[in-house]
Image: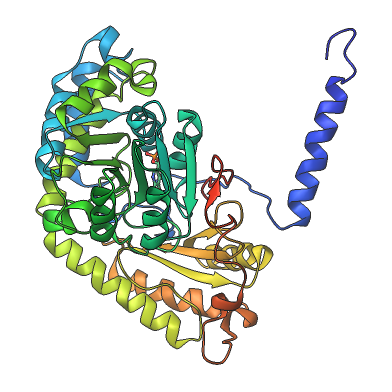
Amino acid sequence: MSAGRDVTVADWLAALDRRAALRAKAGLTRTLRPRTAGDTVVDLAGNDYLGLATHPEVTAAAARALAAYGLGATGSRLVRGSTDAHHLLEDALADWLGTDRALVFSSGYLANLAAVRGLVQPRTLLVSDAHNHASLIDGCRISGAETVVTPHADVAAVAAALAAAPGRPAVVVTESVFSVDGDLAPLAELHAVARRYGALLLVDDAHALGVTGPEGAGGVAAAGLAGEPDVVVTATLSKALGGAGGVVAGPGEFVRHLVETGRTFIFDTAPPPAVAAGVLAAVRLARAGDALRAELAERAARAVGRLGAAGLAVSAPDAAVVSVTAPGPEAATGWAADCRERGVAVGCFRPPSTPDSRSRLRLTISAGVARADFERALDVIVACAPVSARTRIPGRLAWDAAGPECAHEPGLRAPQSRTKEGS
Ligand SMILES: Cc1ncc(COP(=O)(O)O)c(C=O)c1O
């Protein structure tokens, strides 16, 4: 770039252009689309599962804190001070999740980085599910610990990985509701295996908090593991709670460890107090939201039934994420664009956002969408489906034949190399 270097700025920019051209050739271009306030698109792409992002109690609580504290936290809590809004939210989250303590971060991504790194000691082995979110994968990488990537939801593989590392500290890392296909991790079995081998269990409850479990307390609570001393829970506050931020919840000693050593807590500006106050209102509404959860479950089953009846390959309706297999990345992009043209927003997931070679549409069901709009959205998705997406292979769904289960070799002993970056 400067005098004496072989690579000029022009070379660098040309190399970036070449890489963009390669992505375009593979149907993997990503572009930003405009979003206007109050747009009328039916949203089956966002994660506002309970419709709380715009709930009047949530926005009013945020507005009050905004007036009191101003726009931002103006610094980390260790430097600038810790507001009531943060403490009340953490107490409410710990109470809801049934843990000793909770600590909020400015995103779920940063919460996961802190949790994984914070759980690692010298010689720790991390055992990470092949479908884990990018933030967990990056946590494994940043921790520097040896990481075994196990095939998706394979309890026997987890047991084998732990058995092969006797005498070493170990952490089993998983999501509860997996973000791409919406399937559930076998949490009770994973916990039993982890406990048998003296390992800890880290669960990212991002897509389960507010959606599953008693009072919506998430997948860990649903599996009867709330408050277990060898379980640490993380979640984002940006999905069913409609806000922003992340949380790590678990034993008080671990939370203190993160306050004192967690780099993404210490060196990051705290979540804005207004957001913390809004999320606190959302927690109260989510706990009391059994009717919304029943509506969500009914809608997820309805979506799977309607799309399945049209010959599309859909995932099981375990929570509020439903994935529909697309014939390839370009077909997925075109399908999603056609839906959008007809006023329906759906997620479009292609490699490297998928844990395997399959492209999908991802529908995130929301109880906040009007019922008639939801039904119309299902009709639009079916009407826009490429013919090849409807092709069933006799005896099995199209996606069973679509490629290897996972981009990783089972049992890979290396830091995870896949990135999952969102749609
Ligand atoms: C499973 C999972 N974990 C963590 C995150 C990151 O949360 P945040 O968006 O708050 O950074 C996401 C996506 O947003 C997710 O889907």
Q: Quadrant of residue 165?
A: top left
Residue 218 visible within the image: no
Whether 335 is drawn above or below 277: the answer is below
Using the image, determine if residue 102 lies above or below residue 77: below
Given residues 353 and 47, the one toward you in this image is: 353
Instruction: Name the residue nearer the viewer: 268 or 340.
Output: 268
- Residue 379 is situated, as x and y percent measured from the top left of the image, at 45, 78
Q: Determine the residue positioned at 36% across, 52% down.
A: 47
- Which residue in the rendered view is the most extreme toward the bottom? 394
Q: Position of residue 378 (x, y in %)?
A: 42, 75
Residue 194 can be seen, yes or no: yes
Quadrant of the rendered image containing residue 413: top right
The tally of labels here is: 0
Side (left or right) of 183 relative to 285: right
Looking at the rendering, the quadrant in which ligand 1 lies is: top left
Say left or right for 331 vs 276: right
Whole-percent x, y for residue 198 in the image: 26, 43
- Coordinates of residue 62 in the picture (x, y in percent): 21, 32
From the viewer's perspective, is residue 134 above or below residue 15? below
Comparing 418 with 296, the one in front is 418
- Residue at (52% x, 68% y) in the render: 342
From the viewer's perspective, is residue 140 above or below residue 325?
above
Judged left or right of residue 295, residue 173 is right
Q: Residue at x 29, y 66 (%)?
A: 370
Identify the coloring. rainbow
Q: Quadrant of the N terminus?
A: top right
